[in-house]
Image (cartoon, rainbow, N blue to C red):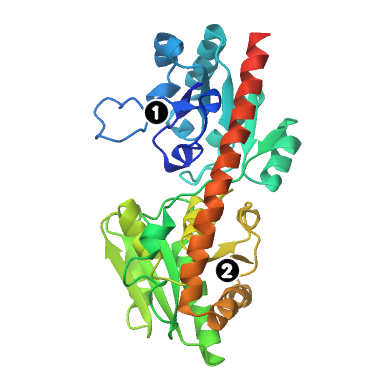
Amino acid sequence: MRIAAVPAGHPYAQHLLDPAAGPGDGIVLLPDPTPPGALHGQWWPPVMLEAEWIRANAHTFDLLHLHFGIESFTLPQLQAVLDALNTAGRPLVFTVHDLTNPQLVDQGPHLAQLDLLVPAADELITLTAGAAALVGERWGREAVVIGHPMLAAPAATSNAPGTAAHRPRRSPITIGVHLRDLRPNIDALGTVETVLDAVGVLRESGLDLAVIVDLNERVRDEDVRQELRRRTAGEPGVELREHPRLSDSELAEALSQVDVEVLPYRHGTHSGWLELCWDLGVAVAAPDVGFFSEQHTGRGEVAVFQPGSVPSMVQALLQLITPLEAAGAERRTTLVRERSAWRAGQQRDIHRAHLSVYRRALAAVAV
């Protein structure tokens, strides 16, 4: 089965497939065409989401599966895509990752795109039951719930010397806040302020904690960067790290150096960052927005806090720190291995679930 996945090169799409699937259950992703003027390996803006490309290449794929990239297009352009798919007899499967777009401040255009695409798709997928319920409420459509796949090969990254899995259980416990390039849904100042205040409270109770605030060299808001430098300067046990954008392997290594990661989001639906942390055995404190808490529900995996609330952050960090204090370093290593093994089984299940959705979509257009 030939799938035009938008985008095929994204780690999410790559990890939907079971490499051991038999010939009758095989799925092939078409490679992403390179946009004009783009760097090698850059998929955005996605060429496959252009009506002209669909008309010229419909014979090369059986189905289009849309994940990301719609913010690059206008409503008329997306309508033209739907028309081209309909003319070619190619179904559309749409995974509703984002009910709000983390790259945008004004959500109006994104919601308008969802109002177009969700009713038009032949099949819908989303990642959590909560998101599926919201899709049903807003659009009267049923979305199949298929969990987020792995995003890392954790056995390799976590076994590197210097990562938390290899360090003895030590003081201090390290809290990480990765702000990346300060995209619109990142509440950098609010999150850092709340974390530092919560850490101060926890230190008074005897806990030895360190904080790493991590930031790309190139950011979207220079004023916020300067305020972060001011706020963290001279704070004991607090380090502000600034660096070029990290590669996937560098990112995995950086995350593996923290014990608890605090997600700094002011809005969102699901989090790939949370999934990467889970793969690496890093506990996650997530804001009570979207459906982050539904992605992993085991004890010590994800704890929820109310944005801006120091008492709530204190409680979330305590929920995650308490199991860490009781576990040795070998537990982190074991945890990563266990999760890697679980991911392998999950990948087979995810493959089969997508295959079922694809077959149903193809059968519908064949009628």
Residue denoted by label 2:
308
Q: Is residue 314 above or below residue 298?
A: below
The disc labelled 1 sits on which kind of residue? Pro
Crowdedness of circle 2 by 10 Å Cα count: few (<14), some, many (20+)? Answer: some
**Percent position of residue 190, x then y:** 50, 67
Residue shown at 44% from the left, 38% from the top: 14
Judge from the rendering whether residue 148 lies leftward or rightward of residue 123; answer left or right: left
Specify whether 326 is left or right of 33.
right
Q: Amino acid at mark 2?
A: Gly
Query: Where the C terminus falls, by quadrant?
Result: top right
Residue 331 in sight from this viewpoint: yes
Does residue 285 appear to the left or right of 130 in the view shown? left
Image coordinates of residue 345 in percent, x first then y, are 57, 47
Position of residue 236 relative to residue 61, above or below, is below
Compare residues 351 and 22 and report the one nearer the observer. Answer: 22
Q: Helix or strand or loop: what does disc 1 sit on?
A: loop
Q: Which mark is residue 46?
A: 1
> Which is nearer the N-term, disc 1 or disc 2?
1
Residue at the (53%, 91%) spot, across then down: 204
Q: Residue at x 43, y 84 (%)?
A: 170
Q: Which numbered disc, 1 or 2, marks the residue closer to the eye?
A: 1
- CA separation in Å, label 1 and label 2: 36 Å
Image x and y of residue 284, in percent = 54, 65
| Quarter of the figure with residue 168 | bottom left
